[in-house]
Amino acid sequence: MSVQNRKSRWAAPLMALALLFGFAFGCTVEQTEEGELPEYEVEQTEEGNLPEYDVDAADVEIGTEEKTITVPDIDIEPPEEDDDPDA
């Protein structure tokens, strides 16, 4: 991605943010001239180098264990049916 594409990607959100601040603080913002980004080209002169990291992560043990759980006994009595369907 070229530098120009990165800058032009932020142009519209920055303009919207500027207008929002203008309305929020009660001042009037009017564009008096069209803007234009400069055109330029960037050449890579040498390879880059990403940093290296030595990470010592925590030891995590995963397993299963059998347990017996006492569950309460619940008796449910259904409601009595009425002959009136509108009830």
Image (spheres, rainbow, N blue to C red):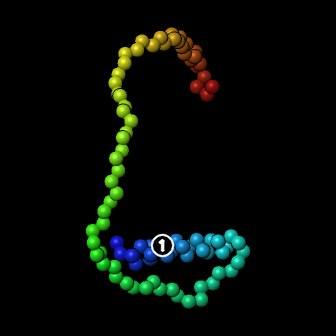
Q: Residue at horizontal 52%, vertical 88%?
A: 34
| Above or below, 38 relative to 64 | below
Quarter of the figure with residue 29:
bottom right
Given residues 43 and 78, the one toward you in this image is: 43
| Above or below, 78 relative to 55 | above
Q: State left or right for residue 40 relative to residue 77.
A: left
Q: Residue at horizontal 44%, vertical 75%?
A: 7
Bin the neighbour count of mark 1 within 10 Å (Cα to Cα): few under 14, some 14-19, many 20 and up. Answer: few
Q: Secondary structure at mark 1?
A: helix
Residue 86 percent location from the top left of the image: 61, 28
Residue 76 percent location from the top left of the image: 54, 13
Q: Residue at horizontal 58%, vertical 71%?
A: 17
Viewport quadrant of the C terminus: top right
**Amino acid type shown at disc 1:** Trp
Q: Residue at horizontal 60%, vertical 74%?
A: 18
Viewport quadrant of the N terminus: bottom left
Residue 58 percent location from the top left of the image: 39, 36
Residue found at the far bottom of this picture: 33
Quarter of the figure with residue 50:
bottom left
Q: State left or right for residue 49 relative to residue 83.
A: left
The number of callouts visible is: 1
Q: Give the residue number, with chain letter if any, for mark 1.
A: 10
